[in-house]
Amino acid sequence: MKPPISFEPKKKLRIIVLVHEDLVPPDSLDGLSSKEALELKTEYDVISSLKSMGHEVHAVGLYNQLNAIGNALLEYKPHIAFNLLEEFHGYPLYDQHVVSYLELMKQPYTGCNPRGLTLAHDKALTKMILAYHRLQVPNFAVFPLNRKVNRPKRLKFPLLVKSISEEGSVGIAQASVVHDDEKLAQRVDFIHRQNKTDAIAEQYIKGREIYVGVIGNQNIQTYAPWELVMEKLPEGAENIATLKVKWDPAYQEKVGVATRAAELTPEQHKSLERLSKRIYRYLFLSGYARLDYRMTDEGQFYLLEANPNPQIARNEDFADSAAHTGLPYEQLLQKIMSVGLNYRPAAT
């Protein structure tokens, strides 16, 4: 990697921002439909904010061309690559290899390292690692593609069925919570057909949905725990973060989706902070991540998923929790770059 540079708030940096080729934002969102603007929001917020902070910013749109990154490194000689990719060549798990390429090129970048991305992308492996360290995770079983569904006897209903590797709640709906073997088989088949991935069925934990933002490499900091609530959820429906809850504004309004600082006791807050830092280290995460928990009525925290490189649009959960902790949006982006510039792979 390049030697660390002096990182001062007013220092002008050369930055390339890696985005999907369809998500290179225009200079203004004026004239776009609300749907179009929503799809470009993260990329627009990051790039426009970095420019307003005085940095030299170049968006690099990618689909499957690593040479486009190499060309950008030669042309712009960036101090840092701001990584907003969530897939490569149409496949979500390939973003970790893009980061490996950046490390091979000795190019500093924002976000998580390849090993952390690899571990966190596999929801079953994540749970196995944390269970080894005696942390609370839901019981689970994996159902591979093209295999008959046989539920282990130890795995009790109700269960939540989802893709083992897809992110963003893809494939998750109210029907994902199943109460018998017939519905389990149907939902596993749905995941296999729609997502083309293995399925994972995990113990459904009733409780509050709480997110914790974590940032850092060796020195780790957590932001204010953030809670997802649905104030107008129909009777009998489960408070789970379905695809519609996350991405459908009309449905969000219908069920009263809101996110806000979680009301916790000082002891719960301290326990969650310690737990989040342990998980972040056990999964070899770096850069920044969001950890998704269920908190039971008894006050126990179960990790559901670890999400490295989470959504960092302005006024989204990660940015809001950082702002609640005292870090406004522009300073958050500056912090993310500072953490990236100071990250060193184990090989160096």
Image (cartoon, rainbow, N blue to C red):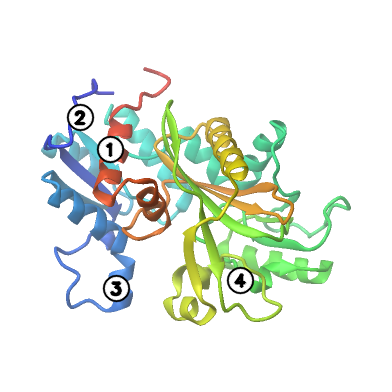
The vertical placement of 11 against 87, above or below, is above
Q: Residues within 10 Å of mark 3 (few under 14, many from 20)?
A: few
Label whose residue precedes the other's in the sequence (4 or 3): 3
| Residue 86 in sight here | no
The percent coordinates of residue 250 (x first, y second) are 44, 81
Q: Residue at x 61, y 66 (%)?
A: 240
* Disc with the residue nearer the chain's start (3 vs 1): 3
The mark lying in front, picked from 4 and 1, is 1
Q: In this figure, which residue is indicated by the disc labeled 2?
A: 7
How far apart are the alpha carbons under marks 4 and 1?
35 Å
Q: Position of residue 7 (x, y in %)?
A: 20, 29
Callout 4: helix, strand or loop?
loop
Callout 4 environment at 10 Å: few (<14), some (14 to 19), or many (20+)? some
* Pointer 1 or 2: first along the chain: 2
Tell me the residue that label 4 is attached to: 173
Farthest residue to the right: give it: 153
Tell me the distance, in whole angstroms, between the alpha carbons under discs 1 and 2.
9 Å
Q: Assign a secondary structure to mark 3.
A: helix
Of 347 and 257, which appears nearest the observer?
257
Mark closer to the chain start, 2 or 3: 2
Q: Which residue is mark 1?
A: 337
Q: Residue furthest front?
A: 266
Q: Are marks 2 and 3 in contact (CB under 8 Å)?
A: no
Residue 90 visible in the picture: yes
The amino acid type, in three-letter code, at marker 1 is Met
Q: Nearer the viewer, mark 2 or mark 4?
A: 2
